[in-house]
Amino acid sequence: MQPQKEKELFKELEKLRELNQRYIHYIRQKVNQLLEVMGTQPLRPEELDDEILLEFDPIGVVAGAFHQILEHLRETVQELKMARDELHAIFNATGVGISIIDTNFRIIRCNEKQRQMLVSEPSEDIRGRFCYEVYCYKDSPGLDCPAVETMATGKPVTLREVKKKDRFFQVVTTPLKASGEIRGVIEVLIDVTEKKKAEELMLRTEKLVSLGQMAAGIAHELNTPLGNILGYARLLEKDPSLSEKQAERVRIIAEQANRCSRIIKGLLDFARKPEYERVNAKCDLIEAINSALSLLKKEADKRQIEIIFENGELPSVRGHSREIEQVFVNIILNALQAIGRQGRVTIKGSVRENSAVVEISDTGPGIPKEIKDRVFDPFFTTKPPGEGTGLGLSISAGTMSRLGGGIEVENLKMGGAVFRLIFPLTGGSER
């Protein structure tokens, strides 16, 4: 009986050994799989004996490894979110318009600047819509579209000047590639309106300089015959045989010749930019306004416009009378042209603190809000060709600034506009 039990126990022991070996083999296999996943070479048998493997907890190791992986993923996701937020902020904060368009010309994304420049309603969702519908108001992409060329050639394209919504833009398109294939286009829109205006202003200024030089040359040529006309007119005035009517006509000839001489001298002064001895010069504002009104009387009568001058008590101010008279001529003439026909221009003078103030108001249509900030820009005019150069208000503003004063402009509640000329009674800047 005893040998039989020993035999059975021996068989049970062999089974346990076999199970242990199978368990050890399983654990070694799983450990090597885990090491392989982690990028490590599998263990050789001598590197991990059977006793250690029996105490090894593969599930715990896997759980720990997954915990480390999860923490790493969380950190990576957080870094990606921060990078995304930074890119999104840069995308929207940049001073140029940016759009990402797919190969079907549908808008994937665009930044806020692009919306402000080209989208009629910046708040509407334009993702998924065709770019040529939203940006160009067309039914299909045109042959001049740079995105079409970029998709066809895979190369960047630059259009130096495109006009949209009354502004000028430079358009640059760049292919968006993935795995070597074109997946869309990145379109960058740069507003070059102000740059274009500056270039045009420079060109027109150069033309004006040439015109001034030419005017100076013509003025010199005209001075001699005008001097002769004036001289002979003065001689005729002394002739006692002239009738009263003839003498009056001679006086008119002399006055008109004098007027032409003053105009020519003004051209020469404009070309030479004389100083007029501004430091000690004084101007009587009432005389300057009356002189300007006498020059503009025929223009006002022709347009059936009444001019009312409420002079108040206006003192003399620092500045050359001819310059200040020209400022009044420019402002009043601008008011007459703004009214067109049948209206009223009112001129009021007053003294406020250390300034003499002249207000020139009209009953015209007023100044549109969108151009109010540009009325003093050189060459800016809303008048038809031939009626204005856009220099009158600009020159007037420059003169007032040089004298240490300024010009304010605003629309009146009852209609029309008022220009407020402010002359300092003390001080001033010389330029």
Image: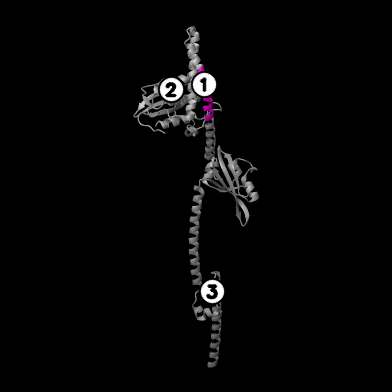
Magenta region: 213-228
Q: Amino acid at mark 1?
A: Thr
Judging by the rendered image, the residue that carries numbered circle 3 is 31
Q: Give the dominant element type of the magenta stretch: helix, strand or loop.
A: helix
Judging by the rendered image, the residue that carries numbered circle 2 is 346
As drawn, 276 above or below 94:
above
Label 1 packing within 10 angstroms: few (<14), some (14-19), many (20+): few
As drawn, 11 above or below 293:
below
Residue 68 in sight in this render:
yes
Q: Earlier in the sequence, mark 3 or mark 1?
A: 3
Determine if the magenta segment contains residue 357.
no
Q: Amino acid at mark 2?
A: Thr
Label 2 packing within 10 angstroms: few (<14), some (14-19), many (20+): some
Closer mark to the observer between disc 1 and disc 2: 1
Q: Secondary structure at mark 3?
A: helix
Q: Seen in the image, is 352 located left or right of residue 105?
A: left
Judging by the rendered image, the residue that carries numbered circle 1 is 224
| Circle on res. 430 | none
